[in-house]
Image: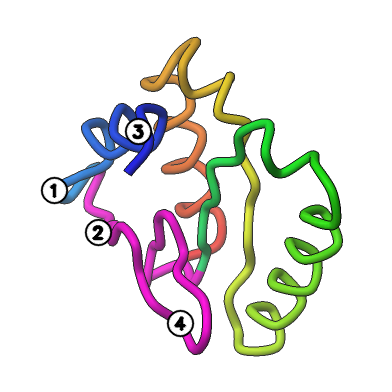
């Protein structure tokens, strides 16, 4: 787990606002950084490596595959998590409440 993922997990673990989150959740050939089963939304923390080479194309294919299997993916910049993990966690909870 990367530093941004660890900081975010510290905010999300347990039942935050009545929602359960899973980390490193396997789905088919993929592993989602954070997943809220009630909302069927996954969250990916992306560092600068996701801007290199064919990574953006692979990320898009991955998101499409997951969407076809009923899971929406939200991408979050690692820099945003490092700047304010609590704010990011709150935005994740808000998103899950809207969907779930």
- Label 2 close to label 1 by CB (< 8 Å): no
As drawn, 53 above or below 60 = above
Residue with the mark numbered 3: 8
**Sequence order check, earlier mark of 4 and 2:** 2
Residue with the mark numbered 2: 20
- Label 4 close to label 3 by CB (< 8 Å): no
Q: How is the image coloured?
A: rainbow
Return the x and y of residue 66 as percentages of the image width and height: 63, 79
Q: Which residues are magenta?
A: 17-40
Question: Depth-wise, is mark 4 or mark 2 nearer the camera?
Answer: 4
Question: Depth-wise, is mark 1 or mark 3 nearer the camera?
Answer: 3
**Sequence order check, earlier mark of 1 and 4:** 1
Q: Count neighbours of disc 3 (C-alpha within 10 A) and say few if under 14, some if 14 to 19, many if 20 or more.
A: many
Residue with the mark numbered 1: 14
For the stretch drawn in magenta, the main secondary structure is: strand
Q: Count neighbours of disc 1 (C-alpha within 10 A) and say few if under 14, some if 14 to 19, many if 20 or more.
A: few
- Label 4 close to label 2 by CB (< 8 Å): no
**Sequence order check, earlier mark of 4 and 3:** 3
Q: Nearer the viewer, residue 22 or 53?
A: 53
Q: CA distance from mark 3 to mark 2?
A: 14 Å
Mark on residue 33? none
Would residue 51 appear left or right of 7 to someone viewing this image?
Answer: right
């Amino acid at each position: 787990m990367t530093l941004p993922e660890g900081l975010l997990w510290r905010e999300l673990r347990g039942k935050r606002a009545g929602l359960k989150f899973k980390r490193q959740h396997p789905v088919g050939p993929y592993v989602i950084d954070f997943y809220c089963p009630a909302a069927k939304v996954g969250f990916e923390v992306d560092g600068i490596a996701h801007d290199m080479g064919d990574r953006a194309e692979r990320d898009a294919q991955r998101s499409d595959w997951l969407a076809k299997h009923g899971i929406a993916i939200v991408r979050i910049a690692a820099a945003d998590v490092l700047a304010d993990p609590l704010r990011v966690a709150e935005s994740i909870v808000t998103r899950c409440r809207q969907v779930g």
